[in-house]
Structure formats: structure tokens, C-alpha cells
Amino acid sequence: MPKELNEDAIAQYFNDGYYFPVEILNKDEVAENRANLEKFESEQGTPIGGAQRNKSHLLFVWVDDLMRHPTLVDAVEDLIGPNLLVWSTDWWIKEAQSPQFVSWHQDSQYWGLDTRKLVTVWVALSPSTVESGCMRVLPGSHLGPDLHHKETFHDDNMLTRGQQIEDIDERLAVNLEVDTGKAVIFAFRMAHASHPNRSNDRRIGLAIRYIP
């Protein structure tokens, strides 16, 4: 018996490559986690960035606690079983009115892992909407071949090398809008992207990657 996701949710994940929303945090928990992040940023005088963006569960106890949240872990267990490892945690923060974007890409193309069972849980600590640059996915792209990427090194691209899939049909893309405290779950090989943040609030997301 599944612990958190029902059979329809599990079927959607495997067929389409994603499922949302999953409610992870209540309002108080969201406020506490965002306050922890912004207190650290205030103390160091700059937004979190560089190497701090990656594997920050090794830096902050509260991120370690978040990746172990029972609802979150139960949802992942429903998809890939109970023996879980967190491979990485990554912050995806776009400042208010920021031109930063994420080009179309597949994580599986450049991480060097040989598993197809990696699951990403993207937790929103602020509203992730079309206006703020929510994640966009290409349903079913996790089932097809690896797609060709080119490296653009665009200044506003949040990807290190600006890697980008060419010839995406934007009409097939789905916007994954989630409110604070909710999460999107998507597959390792899913093609995904996001537009700039045109809202007046930061778009704060934490991606947690689980593998068996």
C-alpha cells in the first residue's frame, strides 16, 4: 500500500514524468524555513550562491531536517522504495524582477549517474507561479531518447554552462504552479525549464534529489 501518493498519482508520475502538488509544509513551517534561509543571507551580507547553493543539507541542520520530512520521504518511497539516499540539495532562487531563467534541459544529460530512478522533489518556500517563473515540463520526455543539448553560457541562465535543448515545442509544455509549502515531484530524465521572475517577491525553491 502506498504511504502518501494514491495509485493515480503514482501512475501519472511514471506515465508523464511528474506529479504535483504534494503538500509538505504548513504556513508556520514555511515561515520558519524561509526565515532560516534569509537570516543566514542577512548575516553573510549576500544571497546564498556559489557552492552554498549545492548540498546545503551538509551546511544547515534545518535543510537536513527538511529533506527528512515524513510526508516528503513517504511520497518518494512510494515511487522508488524505502532505501533512500539524498544525492544532492540545490537552491533555485530568482530574485524579484530578475531576468534569470533556466533553459530547457534534462538533468540526466550531465550528472554522470547510471540510474533512472532519481526523483527530484522541488519544494516551494514562496509562490511559484507563471509570473514568478515556475517550472515548466515536457510531459513524457523522460520516456524518450536523450535530447541534444548545446552550451550557450548565457549570463542570465542559472545553469552552469547554459546547456539548452533545441527545438522544444512550447505548446506541449505544462506549467507546474505551486503555492508555498507545496512540492513538485519529477523524474530524472524529464525535460524542464523556467522563465524569469516578473513578480515582486523572490521565487524560492529547494530541489532535493533522492536515489535508491
Image (tube, grey):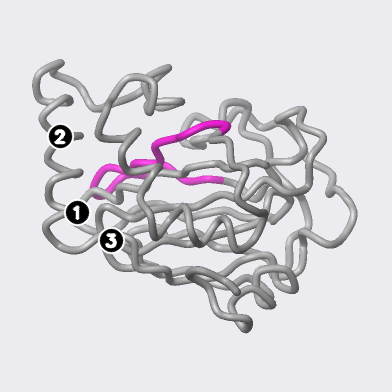
Residue 38 vertical placement versus 4 (above, below): above
Secondary structure, mark 2, is helix
Write down the quadrant of residue 154 in the picture: top right
Instruction: Tell me the magenta residue range.
Output: 87-102
Q: Which residue is mark 2?
A: 38
Quadrant of the image occupied by residue 19: bottom right
Q: Is residue 166 left or right of residue 96?
A: right
**x, y percentage for residue 48?**
28, 26
User: How far is disc 1 from disc 3 in space, using C-alphas?
Assistant: 6 Å
Say which quadrant the C terminus sits in: top right
**Which dot, 3 or 2, sits closer to the camera?**
3
Q: Is residue 92 magenta?
A: yes
Give, as a three-letter code, the residue at label 3.
Gly
- Secondary structure, mark 1, is helix
Q: Nearer the viewer, mark 1 or mark 2?
A: 1
- Counting residues from the start of the chain, the first of labels 3 and 2 encountered is 2
| Mark 2 residue type | Glu
Label 1 sits on residue: 30
Describe residue 198's horizontal placement relative to residue 146 as left or right. left
Residue in the picture at 41% in, 61% down: 183
Asked if disc 1 and disc 3 are in contact, CB closer than 8 Å, the reply is yes
Label ID, residue 181: 3
- Indicate the quadrant containing the N terminus: top left, top right, bottom left or bottom right: bottom right
Q: Earlier in the sequence, mark 1 or mark 2?
A: 1
Q: Secondary structure at mark 3?
A: loop
Q: Is residue 171 visible?
A: no
**At 45% across and 35% down in the image, what residue appears?**
90
